[in-house]
Image (cartoon, rainbow, N blue to C red):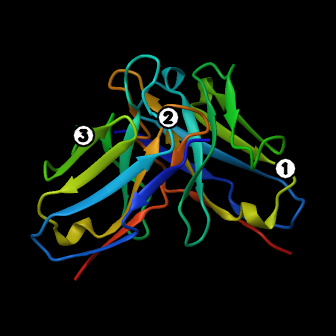
Amino acid sequence: EVQLLESGGGVVQPGGSLRLSCAISGLTVSRSAMSWVRQAPGKGLEWVSTINTSGGSTFYANSVKGRFTISRDNSKNTLFLQMNSLRVEDTAVYHCAREVDIASGSHYGHWGQGALVTVSS
Amino acid sequence: DIVLTQTPLSSPVTLGQPASISCRSSQSLVYSDGNTYLSWLQQRPGQPPRLLIYKISNRFSGVPDRFSGSGAGTDFTLKISRVEAEDVGVYYCMQATQFPHTFGQGTKLEIK
């Protein structure tokens, strides 16, 4: 069974930093591109970032580019999202998700429960 | 960026009756490999999203066959043949053909 478990959320002041982690089990991590998707309170889903299997290619939403950094440690089956220069509008539940299952071509088939990030003074 | 527009945004449905949600893309979602990476996700209250349909019409593992997807190019549809109480939630279409991946606004399915 595939399990994704986020941690590291919390309350931070505007301009501050947080690092989210996502512990991954039940799949071959080194063969899985991974993503972060967020959902502001009462709002829809917003893709944030994707990293390829090796970590050599990363993609970001314009809203976070230059402030957030996605990374992975395949030896520890863990995905990260370093968030700097946080803004009030970054307040959201952040989900890690499996970006693609190469065998089927399905995207976002597995999701974590999410970590709440609140940016407030 | 590709914009996905869903209609309706709210859908009150009687139990046992069908429901249909439309998703229109601002540009073709056909990828260079010939596949169309259009998916449908369900989000029940207080839960993370759940993948229902991928590549337009393929049901994900464990998804009941009352859910079906269709369409091509820029116009797609999710259908529920007979709505059950557990289907209440918000439904999103999303595209993974091109970065940034984008989602529709969401359609809230509720029981009349």
Name above or below for residue B87 compared with residue A95.
below
Judged from the image, the secondary structure of the residue bearing numbered disc 1 is: loop
The label on residue B43 is: none
Q: Residue at x 64, y 63 (%)?
A: A92
Name above or below for residue B71 compared with residue A112.
above
- What residue occupies the far right of the structure in this picture? A15
Q: x%, y% of residue A53?
A: 57, 22
Q: Is residue B45 left or right of residue B1?
A: left
Name above or below for residue B53 compared with residue B92.
above
Q: x%, y% of residue B62?
A: 21, 45
Name above or below for residue A98 compared with residue B18.
above
Is A108 in front, or is B98? B98
Kind of residue at badge 1? Asn
Q: Is residue B1 left or right of residue B43?
A: right
Judged from the image, the secondary structure of the residue bearing numbered disc 3 is: loop
Note whether residue B71 is visible. yes
The label on residue A84 is: 1
Q: Earlier in the sequence, mark 2 or mark 1?
A: 1
The label on residue A99 is: 2
Is A16 in front, or is B91? B91
Residue labelled with disc 3: B61
Q: x%, y% of residue B50?
A: 37, 52
How many C-alpha atoms fall within 10 Å of the one at disc 1: few (<14), some, or many (≥20)? some
Note whether residue B60 is visible. no
